[in-house]
Image (cartoon, grey):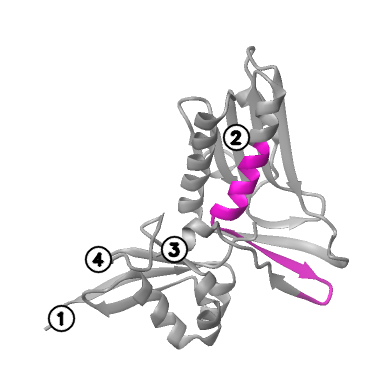
Amino acid sequence: MKRAVRVKVLFFGVLKEVVGAAQDELELAEPARVGDVLEAYAQKFPRINEMSSSIVPARNRQFAARSEEIRDGDEIALLPPVSGGAGPYTHLIEDPAGHFFALTRRPIETQEIVRRLQRDEDGAVVEFRGVVRNNTRGRPTRMLDYDCYEPMAIEIMARIGRALAAERPIGRIAMVHRLGRLEVGETSVAIVVTAPHREAAFAAALEAINRLKLQVPIWKKEHFADGEVWVEGQWDPSLRSG
C-alpha cells in the first residue's frame, strides 16, 4: 500500500485569484514529485493549465526542478512569471560585509540607505529608483499592487547582491523593494551601490535590477480606470529547466 505525502501549497500573484486562496493542502501518493503538485492544480483549474509552462515551482523556499522528489510536510510554492523585519521593513538582511537587503510596505527612504552603505573610501554612490509611472503603453495607470513570496524573495535578493559584490570591484550594495499598494510617482524599488570608481558602481546597479526582475518572486498588478491586470513578465530561463 502506497504511503501518502501531504504538502502545503502556496499561490502568488494571479494564481492566488485563479485558485481563490493564498494556500492549500494537497495529498499525493508516494513517490511524488514537484511537477505532480503543479499537475494536480492544472487539472483542476484550466487557467493554471494554460500557464503551466511559465510557472516556476519552489520547494521549501528554494527554486526546484519539477522532477525533484517531495517529502511529507514540504512547502511548495507555485510562482507565476514575475513582473519584474525591523523598523519599517517586513524582512531584512544586513550582511556582515555591510550589504543591505529589505522588503517594506512603507515609502523607501533612499538617503537612509545611502547613509548605511557609504564609507570614506567610496568615490562613487549610484542610486537607482524604479517609480510608478502614470501609464502603460498609453493606457492611464491609477495605481499598482505588489505581491511577494517574502521569505524566499529576501533570500534571493541577498544572493544576487552578494554575487555581484564578489564579481565586481564595488564596496557595498543595497536592494530594497516595496510591497502593497503604490500610487503614481512612488518608489517601488531602490538599488544603491557604493564603489571606489563610478564604472563599477553603474554596472553593478544595472545588473542588480536586471537580475531582480528575472529572479525574485514579486508580482505587479496594474489598476486602470477601465480595469486591472496582473503584469505578465518572464523568469530567468535557467529557472525553468527540469
Q: Residues within 10 Å of mark 4 (few under 14, many from 20)?
A: some
Mark 4: secondary structure = loop
Counting residues from the N terminus, which is met first, the one under dot 3 or under dot 1?
Answer: 1
Q: Which residue is mark 2?
A: 174
- The location of residue 231, given as percent across then percent down, is 68, 67
Counting residues from the N terminus, which is met first, the one under dot 2 or under dot 4?
Answer: 4
Residue visible at 78% across and 54% down? Answer: 132
In the displayed structure, 6 sits above or below 83; it is below
Residue visible at 52% across and 26% down? Answer: 98
Q: Which sits in the foreground, 1 or 224?
A: 1
Do the residues bearing badges 1 and 4 touch, measured as CB atoms within 8 Å?
no
Do the residues bearing badges 3 and 2 touch, measured as CB atoms within 8 Å?
no
Q: Which residue is mark 4?
A: 71
Disc 1 to disc 4, C-alpha distance: 14 Å
Front of the two marks 3 and 1: 3
103 part of magenta stretch: no
Q: Quadrant of the N terminus?
A: bottom left
Disc 2 to disc 1, C-alpha distance: 49 Å
Disc 4 to disc 3, C-alpha distance: 21 Å
Front of the two marks 4 and 3: 3
Q: Which residues are magenta?
A: 205-227
Q: Which residue is mark 3?
A: 241
Counting residues from the N terminus, which is met first, the one under dot 2 or under dot 1?
Answer: 1
In the displayed structure, 82 sits above or below 123; it is below
- The location of residue 216, given as percent across then percent down, is 55, 53
